[in-house]
Image (cartoon, grey):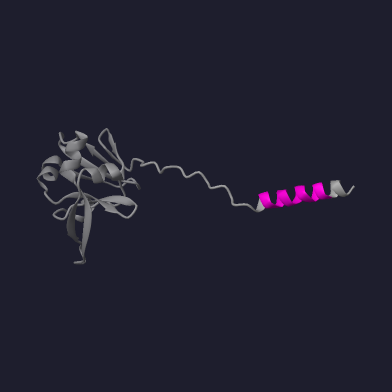
Amino acid sequence: MKKISIFVSLLIVVGLLTACGPAQEAVVEEAVDEAILTVGDAEYSQTDLESLGTVSVDYTDKDGETTTYEGVLLADLLADAGADDGATVTFTAADGFSSDVTMEEVLACTNCIVAFDGDSLRTVMPDFGGKQNVKDLIAIDVN
């Protein structure tokens, strides 16, 4: 009877030690670099955009406040996507707001960018009206 008691006690101790051991490490999945912007038929992740090279641009809003943004030159992005042949460029925000600019104006603009704005994107077009500075940008279409 003593042997059975010792054996049962030993099993209980082993069970407790196993339960109190270090937790198994969670499997960490590699983050997928998801598409955040559609340009014509091409999709871009933030890594894709950054690989095109970034520049800094100052933008002064209607209240006279200047902010520096970092992003990709719009003309370079359109060329990379093969979407630089058309008459009109349409910028579309996540909420459905859209703004149009002529392709000629966009290609001539040397400081127009698609900027990284926290977790989203935006157009920064210093020499254009406020409506062309589209926040939460998700798509650029060329017609």
Name the side, left or right, on which 105 lies relative to 29: left
> Residue at 74% across / 52% down in the picture?
13
Dominant secondary structure, magenta: helix
86 or 45: nearer the viewer: 45
Whole-percent x, y for residue 78 in the image: 19, 39
Point out the residue furthest to the right here: 1
> Residue at 29% across / 50% down in the picture?
121
Whole-percent x, y for residue 34 in the image: 36, 41
> Residue at 82% across / 50% down in the picture?
6
Q: Which residues are magenta?
A: 6-18
> Residue at 24% across / 38% down in the picture?
141
Number of numbered tags placed on the structure image: 0
Residue 87 falls in image quadrant: top left
Point out the residue furthest to the bottom here: 64
40 or 62: nearer the viewer: 40
Magenta region includes residue 16: yes
Whole-percent x, y for residue 24 in the image: 57, 47
Whole-percent x, y for residue 84 in the image: 16, 36
Question: Is residue 84 shown above or below 9?
Answer: above
Residue 45 falls in image quadrant: top left
Magenta region includes residue 7: yes
Q: Quadrant of the C terminus?
A: top left
